[in-house]
Image (cartoon, rainbow, N blue to C red):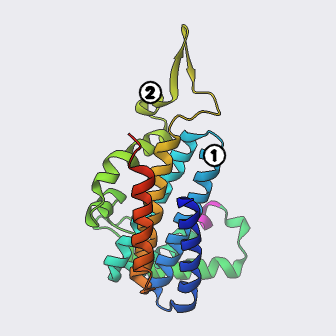
């Protein structure tokens, strides 16, 4: 019920934001928070079907979009970089799939890339590979979420990338054999649900603060529900 109530709250907030937002920052935050909420729906589908590891991997993306939303909200001067880096990404796609672009589109993409290139050029002359000079870790630290990065996020990243730590999480001993955890399984389901729920509520708070929606009391109630639901979980 808590999750259903919070999803209904998110839906109300998105509708309110659509009618009120007007600035580029507000649009960026709205889109990132929407991505976080969509990720939570995907997480619920996986967790509900006993795919906890997959759900944890989804939570990783939720963390990143929620962190970027709050980082932009508190670093307004960098919102143009977020949008303008799209020109760099489009130029990269042009290099990979030039036959998919019309001559007119190629000219447009190259012109936009040349316009913003210097904005993202490092001291050694390379165009950086991310819209922001800071990593997700530094963004998380800047907004007070470094502990989340160090534990739940880093575990999710290990699972996503398949490093040795991920192998330890995935492999189970069965008689004299080592096997991958079979699905459906309750392994990691609780952890995924807790992480995803946290990121959703944090993202909604960011949206509320950015667009000044006035859902403060509703969000306080949501956080109270969260504590009541998850506090008994060891």
At 70% from the left and 78% from the top, the residue drawn is 103
126 vs 28, nearest the viewer: 28
Q: Quadrant of the N terminus?
A: bottom right
On the image, the x and y values in percent for residue 162 come to 49, 36
231 vs 65, nearest the viewer: 231
Residue 48's disc number: 1
Residue 92 visible somewhere in the drawing: no
Q: Is residue 155 left or right of residue 173?
A: left
Residue 125 visible somewhere in the drawing: yes
Q: Which residue is mark 2?
A: 168
Q: Is residue 7 left or right of residue 221?
A: right
Instruction: Please report contact status of discs 1 and 2: CB closer than 8 Å, yes or no.
Output: no
Q: Residues within 10 Å of mark 2 (few under 14, many from 20)?
A: few
99 vs 119, nearest the viewer: 119
Extent of the magenta region: 91-96
Q: Quadrant of residue 9?
A: bottom right
Image height of 77 relative to 176, above or below: below
On the image, the x and y values in percent for residue 133 come to 33, 66
Q: Residues within 10 Å of mark 1 (few under 14, many from 20)?
A: some
- Give the spatial CA distance, label 1 vs label 2: 23 Å
Judging from the image, what secondary structure is the residue with disc 2 in? helix
On the image, the x and y values in percent for residue 34 come to 55, 71
Specify the principal SS of the magenta part: helix
Q: Is residue 159 magenta?
A: no
Q: Quadrant of residue 186?
A: top right
At 40% from the left and 82% from the top, the residue drawn is 210
């Amino acid at each position: 019920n808590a999750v259903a109530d919070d999803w209904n709250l998110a839906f109300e907030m998105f509708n309110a934001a659509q009618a009120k937002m007007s600035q580029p920052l507000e649009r960026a935050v709205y889109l990132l928070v929407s991505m976080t909420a969509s990720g939570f729906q995907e997480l619920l589908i996986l967790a509900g079907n006993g795919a906890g590891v997959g759900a944890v991997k989804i939570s990783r993306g939720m963390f990143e979009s929620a962190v970027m939303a709050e980082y932009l909200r508190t670093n307004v001067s960098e919102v143009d970089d977020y949008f303008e880096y799209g020109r760099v990404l489009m130029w990269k796609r042009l290099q990979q799939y030039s036959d998919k672009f019309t001559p007119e589109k190629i000219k447009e993409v190259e012109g936009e890339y040349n316009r913003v290139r210097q904005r993202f050029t490092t001291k050694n002359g390379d165009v950086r590979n991310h819209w922001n000079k800071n990593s997700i870790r530094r963004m998380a630290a800047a907004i007070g979420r470094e502990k989340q990065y160090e534990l739940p996020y880093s575990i999710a990243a290990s699972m996503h990338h398949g490093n040795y730590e991920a192998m330890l999480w995935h492999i189970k001993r069965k008689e004299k054999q080592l096997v991958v955890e079979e699905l459906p399984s309750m392994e990691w389901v609780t952890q995924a649900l807790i992480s995803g729920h946290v990121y959703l509520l944090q993202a909604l708070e960011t949206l509320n603060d950015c667009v000044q929606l006035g859902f403060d009391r509703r969000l306080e109630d949501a956080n109270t529900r969260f504590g009541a639901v998850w506090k008994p979980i060891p």
